[in-house]
Image (spheres, rainbow, N blue to C red):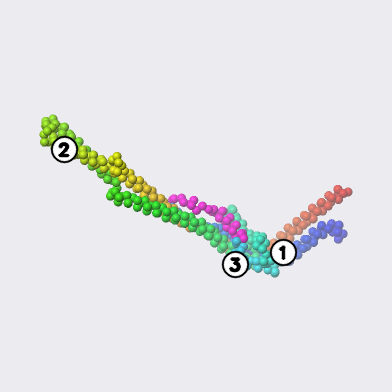
Amino acid sequence: MKKLKKHPHWAIALAAVFCAFIYWMLLATDRYVSEANIVLQSPEIATTNLNFSSLLSGTSGAGDLLLLRDYLLSVDMLNILDEQLDIRSHYADTSIDRLSRLADADAPMESLYSYMQKRIDIRYDDYANVLRVRVQAYNPEMAQQIAKTLLHEGERHMNLMGQRLAEEQVAFIEGQVETLSKRLYQAREELLSFQNEHGLVSPTGSVESIMMIVAQLEAQRALMEAQKKAGSSFQSTTSPEMQRLDSQIEALSQQIQAERRKMATADGGALNRVSADFETLTLQAQFALELYSNSLMVLESTRVEAARKLKQVSVLQHPTLAQFSVEPRRLYNFTVFLFLTILLAGIIQLMRAIIRDHLD
């Protein structure tokens, strides 16, 4: 006793160790643990060779699991747990020792959140790519119910996130499809109106037909000019045969000029202008059709990718129902407290000795 009076820090250390022994070994309330291991999986849906995955960008794998972990540890999840399971009443029950229980069932959210951080432990195993959930409660049923609620609400939240993003993307693509559909219809109507206005299904084909006619007429004229040249060697220019050839050659020349005027004139109203305008309208209609076709392909691919954004929480280990309490670790906690107390008292003893040496 004299030594303890001389070294009061050791008396305090012994008192603290005694109190810790009483608390950890006799007073601390048993806590039951429910554990679960989960992964996130997406449906395996085969897609086309076209790569439209960039339309639905987002995290995957570890990123999704970390997002899920943050949500499970969020205040929103705490509100859901309190609403569905009334966790305030459970953790503030007066049968729980004062040091372990929630101070008040009406404690502010900040206090409840800080308290639950010690009762819900969610860790990401980057080696196995698994989320490990560990929930502590003061009866095994409540621990298991909290773990089950975490898994159910976590899956629902991840699906809502994926569905919202997918719906926005699909709605955007559908709007583009509708716009391109109207553009295609307008281009086709302009093409049909142009054809009806000029009475031609294909001006380009008409130009090609006229060119063939001109070529045939020129061939006939060349043949008659050859006949005229051959006849001029033994016939007079005033002979009926020579006059007939001159008349036919003249008629063919006039016909050739008339056909050529159909294809091109100085005022720009011939078939070459019509054909050029027709080709422009045709290209516009083809381009609108290609855009519309591509937008339909993008829409279907987006819908497939939207289905792949749905996340399913696959349970590797379902929430366990504890058969006995594993928390608090009484002997471990008391041993650690004893070691730290002795270490602190020893440090104080050493400091006092150093101070006395300097005073002497």
**Mark earlier in primary sequence (1, 2):** 1
- The picture quadrant where one finds residue 67 is bottom right
* Span of residues in magenta: 49-75
Of circles 2 and 3, the one toward us is 2
- CA–CA distance between discs 1 and 3? 26 Å
Of circles 1 and 3, the one toward us is 3
- CA–CA distance between discs 2 and 3? 107 Å
On the image, the x and y values in percent for residue 92 come to 68, 67
Relative vertical location of residue 355 with respect to residue 264 in this rendering, above or below: below
**Residue 311 appears anywhere in the view:** no
Q: Which mark is residue 99?
A: 1
Q: Residue at x 30, y 41 (%)?
A: 267
Q: Is residue 183 magenta?
A: no
Q: Characterize the local packing of mark 3: few (<14), some (14-19) or many (20 or more) Cα atoms within 10 angstroms.
A: few
Between 296 and 147, the one nearer to me in the picture = 296
Which amino acid lies under the numbered mark 3 shown in the image of this protein? Gln
Q: Which mark is residue 247?
A: 2
Q: Could you tell me if the residues under marks 2 and 3 are in contact, i.e. CB atoms within 8 Å?
A: no
